[in-house]
Image (tube, rainbow, N blue to C red):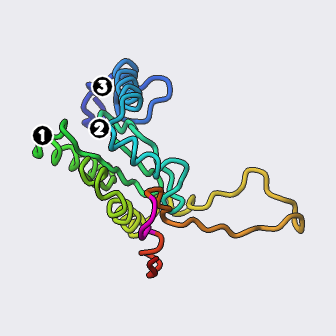
């Protein structure tokens, strides 16, 4: 081979390839497994998704059971390259989790792990910690942090209205919600 290039042992990417070096068949397997995981989420994952879906946590968008190469992230915030893993009974090998986390880190992702028990019993703390972590991470695509509107108003027409996202609204009933704690108030 010219220039000392080694031959590729991966089949050529097909279709919508994302550069992972996976065959179309393997990619389809992983996508099916991710879809099955979404349809059979644990109680902790379902509970957490209520607060992560529709950009409810500080305006950050999440995807659940997102395929990244051969790994499937429980939750992924693409803007911050943050993977949130909810560890339960299937995470019995900390060494395997550490190897997987390291592999994802080499791809530029930050992996944050919480336990099923924490999500089920200390959700406010989990969400507060997650929001603080999100705020501390740089945007993955700084130039795309606020994409232009696909249909901008002509000059002088319409008004831009500022919106804010509160980090969290508690659905758990009375008590101190995360948004109150972050703002430094209680009630």
Q: Nearer the viewer, mark 2 or mark 3?
A: 3
Residue linked to disc 1: 92
Q: Nearer the viewer, mark 1 or mark 2?
A: 1
Residue linked to disc 2: 3
Q: Nearer the viewer, mark 1 or mark 3?
A: 1
Q: Quadrant of residue 160?
A: bottom right
> Is 124 situated left or right of 16 in this image?
left
Q: Residues within 10 Å of mark 2 (few under 14, many from 20)?
A: few
Q: Residues within 10 Å of mark 3 (few under 14, many from 20)?
A: few
Q: Is residue 58 magenta?
A: no
CA–CA distance between discs 1 and 3?
A: 31 Å
The first of marks 1 and 2 along the sequence is 2
Which stretch appears magenta? Answer: 173-178
Q: Which mark is residue 66?
A: none
Q: Are marks 1 and 2 in contact (CB under 8 Å)?
A: no
Residue linked to disc 3: 10
Residue 57 position (above or below residue 5): below
Residue 2 position (above or below residue 165): above
């Amino acid at each position: 081979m010219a220039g000392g290039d080694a031959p590729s042992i991966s089949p050529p990417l097909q279709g919508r390839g994302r550069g992972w070096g996976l065959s179309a068949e393997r990619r389809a397997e992983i996508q099916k497994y991710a879809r099955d995981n979404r349809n059979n989420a644990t109680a902790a994952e379902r509970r957490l998704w209520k607060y992560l879906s529709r950009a409810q946590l500080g305006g950050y968008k999440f995807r659940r059971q997102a395929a990244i190469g051969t790994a499937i992230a429980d939750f992924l915030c693409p803007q911050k390259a943050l993977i949130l893993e909810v560890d339960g009974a299937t995470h019995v090998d900390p060494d395997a989790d550490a190897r997987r986390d390291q592999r994802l880190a080499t791809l530029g992702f930050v992996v944050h792990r919480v336990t099923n028990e924490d999500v089920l019993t200390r959700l406010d703390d989990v969400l507060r910690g997650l929001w603080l972590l999100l705020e501390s991470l740089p945007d993955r695509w700084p130039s795309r942090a606020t994409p232009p509107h696909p249909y901008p108003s002509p000059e002088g027409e319409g008004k831009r209205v500022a919106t804010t996202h509160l980090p969290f609204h508690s659905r758990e009933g009375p008590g101190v919600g995360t948004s109150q704690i972050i703002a430094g108030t209680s009630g």
